[in-house]
Image: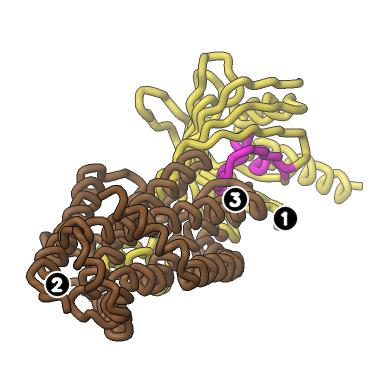
Amino acid sequence: MKFILKTELYKLIKQSKTWYALGAVLVIEFIILGAAYYQGTAILELLLENLTESFYFEGNLLNGNLLLYVVLNSLWFNIPLILMIITSGIITEEYKSGTLQSLLLQSVQKRKLLIAKYMASLIFTVTVIVILGFTSFTLAYGIFGKGDLIVYLGTLNFFEEADAFRRISCAFLSGMLSMIFYTTTSITLGILLKDPAKTWIASAFFLIFCSLLLKLDIGLSNFDYLFFPKLTNSWQLFFEFNLDWKLILLQNIGLIIYSILFAIIGITIFNKQDIG
Amino acid sequence: MKKTYLLFILLQLSINCIAQEIDSDLLYIKNRMDSIQEFSADLELNLDVSFINMPTKHASVLFKKDEELDFSSEDFVMLPKRGLDFSLSELFKYPFITVDRSKKNINGTLTKVLNIIPTDDKADFALATVYLDIEHKRIHIAEINTKKLGSYTITMTYENKEAILPDNVTVTFAMEKLKIPLNFMGRDTDIDRKKMRNLDTKEGKIMMKISNYKITY
């Protein structure tokens, strides 16, 4: 198992498209960060416009923490597709090139092979998000400095510098779970469709489907709390003024359960498939 | 000669009348406040506005006679444009007259209610109602109607009987509702429209705890 995992990771590192994807993700991050600076100014003007009649403001709100929050908002929509394209390739490329057949002719168990592929996808996703998090924090704090964070979620919420850092870090971790969910799903889609291009289209459709359902409000509380498209936005819960830890845990554990469930579905289908 | 004498008497009478228009207790408080040349203090600020969540903030304040209050803070702070001047120097900056509105017991404190009406157009306020703590000769509550910034109320409590400046100040003011376009909503599906409609004009409060006074007379 360990050997298979190492092989899968080696294949991921060796393929050029992994590095292209990482490069693309970082370029997107820099663009978002640049845009966030201008968007941040507009957001602040908008949020504080009504309050300038009543208040003086002392201190700087256009800082690294606000930019990180804006980056977080854009990141979780822009990054998943690139990650899904790379991780689905772990299985679809094998189908396409026929290497899967020769691999299974050796003494490799189907189940173990697929678990290793899901694990490789998980490690890849975590690595990308850690790199993204590290570069985002370094750039945002390095260029724009630290300070209090202002967020609008029904009410204007102000967080002190240290509190903002904690919340943004937690949001990155929660966002990472969403990304793991998406990349796990992409492998399952790859098993179903077997073809890289079809899987990319299905992945894009799945992303759009999730973002549409995320905005759908049918007034059922269980739907909001437990349906997977809704859970992909659970990182926002860290910016409520009073943290609802029960809901945060429920939604993030829900994401983990959905990821495992989608992986089990993938493994079950793969086990029943006649390769070759 | 007779006419000149009559004019002199009328002039004298009118001067006396104007002098009598300022309440003696308020005059005493004014003189007491005027004796402060400078003070500095530490502030703990707590904002109470239904649509704003802000943790407790800290700042320091420096007052110099005839100068604007100077606030400084390492944190981001929101300071109300109205009611920060708890020395109430603005009330006494320009000539005024007072009208006695009888006495009122507020939470066990017997207060004299006075209207302060500025007689100079340069004054920022149109009318102020002050509740004077008669026993301790200081202002307990001031309701101020400004010309440009609406109305606000300052309620002050003091550390001890001798204190000239308050240790707790609550400023109450009206605020307009927050207008945020939908695309800036963090989670745009969760808009509580009923709640938003109720946010037309809201009362805001800022509570200031003032400590470490350094007063120069």
Please tell me how crowded label 3 is: few (under 14), some (14-19), or many (20+) other residues with Cα within 10 Å: some
Residue A185 colored magenta? no
Q: Chain of mark 1?
A: B
Residue B73 in which image quadrant: top right
Q: Is residue B103 above or below residue B123?
A: above
Q: Do the residues at pointers 1 and 2 share their chain?
A: no
Left or right: residue B20 versus residue B150 is right
Residue type, numbered disc 2:
Ile
Residue type, numbered disc 3:
Thr
- Chain B is shown in which shade? yellow
Marks 1 and 3 sit apart, C-alpha to C-alpha, by 52 Å
Marks 2 and 3 sit apart, C-alpha to C-alpha, by 40 Å
Closest to the observer, A126 or A99: A99
Q: Chain of mark 2?
A: A
Please give the residue where the numbered disc 3 appears in the rendered image.
A138
The secondary element bearing badge 2 is classed as loop
Q: Earlier in the sequence, mark 2 or mark 3?
A: 3
Please give the residue where the numbered disc 2 appears in the rendered image.
A218
Look at discs 2 and 3 and give the one toward the viewer. Answer: 3
Residue at the (56%, 27%) spot, across then down: B210
Q: Residue furthest right?
A: B1
Tell me how the rendering is colored: by chain
